[in-house]
Image: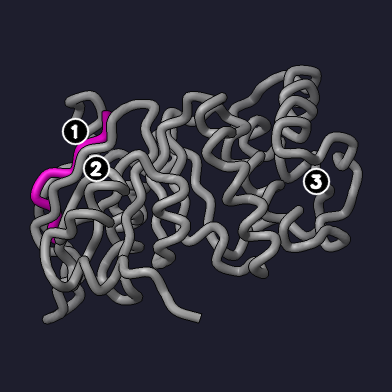
Amino acid sequence: MLALHDINVRYGETVAVDRVDLTVEKGSTVCVLGPSGCGKSTLLRVVTGLVRPDAGRVTWDGEDITDVPTHRRGFGLMFQDHALFPHRDVAANVGFGLRMQGRPRAAIAARVDELLELVGLAGYGRRAVDELSGGEQQRVALARALAPEPRMLLLDEPLGSLDRVLRDRLLDELPSLFDRLGTTVLYVTHDQDEARAIADEVAVMRAGRIAQVGTPAEVWERPADEFVAEFVRPRRG
């Protein structure tokens, strides 16, 4: 499992993450939910290794990985802006991490075909990424993150750039996809609907701290304080 122990991150006088403890069990999906500026994306970057905490430790199965470089953590990363390579086709984008691992060409091709079918893009391998819709590009980004068989998948506002129809479609599909793969997921979002639909556990953040951790039912039905109650309240209109 992944565990964060007393994580602190400061930017000058600003405390972005304040003494955060969090555990993500293998095979589970944990959503870090909170408003903009609460520290949730910084916390994710601590897990990825892109930000080193000023205090605290990150462990995986009890091993301290706080100083392990990003590319050696074995985690898959997926961000809101897709970050696809525009000069490469779909197959080349999905297979990028596999080539970096030095896998044989035939094995890469087979894995790419498997993942494109998994995310609903079978036959798209030779398509240029700039010919795809936003939802299709997001599926390619997900397939690329999953291709090297990461021990954990980290997603930062992955559906934030999609229109409502595409977002809702992917939101319906992601939980079953994660279940089929048995993937451990840390999912960062400001959207209450996403967290409620996807998470096994939700960690609500406020001003750098975790205000409550629990199942969606626990958080929505028994909020820990007024902030949590207001933040997860169903939106009107």
Mark in the foreground, 1 or 2: 1
Secondary structure of the residue carrying tag 2 is: loop
Instruction: Please give the label number shown on residue 64.
Output: 1
Residue at the image point whose x is 61% and y is 69% from the top: 161
User: How far apart in space, not on screen, are marks 1 and 2 (Cα)?
Assistant: 8 Å
User: How far apart in space, not on screen, are marks 3 and 1 (Cα)?
Assistant: 36 Å
Q: Which residues are magenta?
A: 1-8
Check residue 133 for magenta coloring. no
Secondary structure of the residue carrying tag 1 is: strand
Residue at the image point whose x is 54% and y is 57% from the top: 158
User: How many numbered marks appear?
Assistant: 3
- The first of marks 3 and 2 along the sequence is 2
Residue at the image point whose x is 27% and y is 28% from the top: 1
Q: Which amino acid type corresponds to the residue marked 2 in the rendered image?
A: Asp
Image x and y of residue 44, in percent: 34, 54
Graded by Cα atoms within 10 Å as few (under 14), some (14 to 19) or many (20 or more), the crowding at tag 2 reads few
Disc 2: which residue = 67
User: How far apart in space, not on screen, are marks 3 and 2 (Cα)?
Assistant: 33 Å
